[in-house]
Amino acid sequence: MKQLLPFETVIFDLDGTLAQSAPGVFQCVTEALQRMNKPIPDKATLRKFIGPPLCHSFIHFCGMTQEEADIGVAHYRDVYLNGGIYNNSTFPYIMELLQNLKEHGAKLCVATSKPEPMAKIVLDHLKVTPFLDYMAGADLDERHSNKTELIEKGLLHCNTKPSHAVMIGDTHFDAHGAKHANTNFIGVLYGYGTREEMEREGATQFVETAKDLQSILLPNFSDKL
């Protein structure tokens, strides 16, 4: 029997929320920089590439010009589409969470700054696509990668008021997007961002694991865990 849900629509970020994408991102950034004879940053800096638009990351984290960043993005995508895209997996309990939410009538969306064609490949690879009602991603040139705009697309597609939905994410980009879309936000601490960066965007609710997330999204069902 379906229970009354606290949120009609649940919108997930992809990298760092549904997908453990760090291995693939590290591989692609490293090979792109090697092709350009650029120094490889430390792991802490590489982690910052997970989530934001690529061009932004190459400029802000590697000190590139716009022209260099465009070249870096092209190299990254070449590596990505030739194997790096499959170097990821879902976080523990994510698949069970998605199935349980779907069985109880929740509408499920993904809002990602990853280009939409690539996001679709990843979601298919992870076997997440069948659970989704909608996926909003950026254009290939990274236009329309603003998280607020992507969240609003999901709300519109699912015909859901912002107050009846929740954005789930791991970075300040996700928290910022939810705040400006006037929707609820839950920060996951198992991803690649930090609690502090999300708190700076007004986030107040956090979970350590996907099981903890289920206890909020399906409060009655969680008693069976």
Image: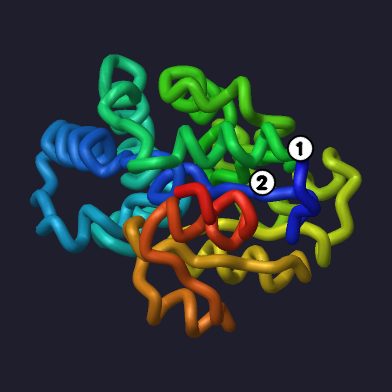
Q: Position of residue 89 (x, y in %)?
A: 32, 32
Q: Mark 1 is on which residue type?
A: Met
Residue 159 higher or lower than 86, as above or below = below
Q: Which residue is mark 2?
A: 144
Residue at (26, 34) in percent of width and height: 24
* Position above or below: 101 against 124: below
Q: Nearer the viewer, residue 101 or 81?
A: 101
Q: Is residue 180 visible?
A: yes
Q: How many marks?
A: 2
Q: Earlier in the sequence, mark 1 or mark 2?
A: 1
Relative to 152, 47 lies left or right: left
Residue 36 appears in view: no
Is the C-beta separation of discs 1 and 2 under 8 Å? no
**Vertical placement of 182 versus 52: above or below?**
below
Pick whichever, 173 or 165, lies toward us: 165
Rendering coords of residue 40 (x, y %) = 10, 50
- Which residue bears the numbered disc 1? 1
Regarding mark 1 in the picture, which secondary structure is present there?
A: loop
**Label 2 CA crowd tier, 10 Å (few <14, some 14–19, many 20+):** some
Q: Nearer the viewer, mark 1 or mark 2?
A: 1
